[in-house]
Amino acid sequence: MSNIETTNLFLGIMAGVSLVQLLMLIAALVVGFRAYRTLSARFDVFDEQRLAPLAQKAQAVVEDVQRLTSQVATQTERVEHAISQTAERFEERAERVRANVRRRVVPMVAAVRTFQETLRQNGTTPHDPVLARETETRLAAAEAVERGEPWPTEAEPSAKQRGAYWSPGL
């Protein structure tokens, strides 16, 4: 064989190998495109069957949270309003009670003072010194209440006063 024939033979083999490579490359592209279409279809099915329901559930949860937040805000406003109204009513009633107590206690204190002054003017004093001391303490407490001060605890009635000598208004 001559040199040209050998060269031609090698060129023919190379051309055949290139043609086989081209065919293999085309086959790989076709297989790759089919795999792409199959995976794309599977992803679409996965999206429709799995992700879409999850997205809908997540959206429903977000809407529920928004609704609950709105309800909590509304209820909070209602509770705050109710508390403020209750506090206002309590203050009004407390003031009415204070006024009623003053209206009823002041005349009783005046009567006790009159009685005390009458006893002093007549020179009459209670016979029991403990009872006299407790009566003075309670009279001083009644005067404090008349000035708007709270009833002192030391002016609470003794066991003896709670018996025959004590009445709740003194």
Image (cartoon, rainbow, N blue to C red):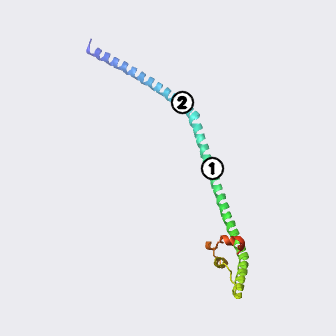
Query: Foreground residue, 115 or 161?
Result: 161
Task: Kindly identify which numbered label has been placed on residue 42.
Answer: 2
Q: Which residue is drawn at 68% across and 63% down?
A: 86
SS under mark 2: helix
Which of the numbered marks, if any, corresponds to residue 68?
Answer: 1
Query: Depth check: 15 or 110 in front?
Result: 110
**Residue 99 found in image quarter:** bottom right
Q: Earlier in the sequence, mark 2 or mark 1?
A: 2
**Residue 88: % across, % down:** 67, 67
Q: How crowded is mark 2: few (under 14 residues within 10 Å), some or many (20 or more)?
A: few
Looking at the image, residue 60 lies above or below residue 50: below
Inspect the image, locate mark 2, and give the three-letter code of the amino acid beneath it: Arg
Q: What element carries label 1?
A: helix
Of 21 and 143, the residue lying toward us: 143
Check disc 1 and give the amino acid type.
Answer: Leu
Residue 138 is at least partly visible in this image: no
Residue that appears at 65% across and 58% down: 79
**Residue 11 placement (x, y as % from top left):** 32, 19
Query: If the image is split into quadrants, where does the N terminus sit?
Result: top left
Q: Which of 22 and 116 is in front in this view?
A: 116
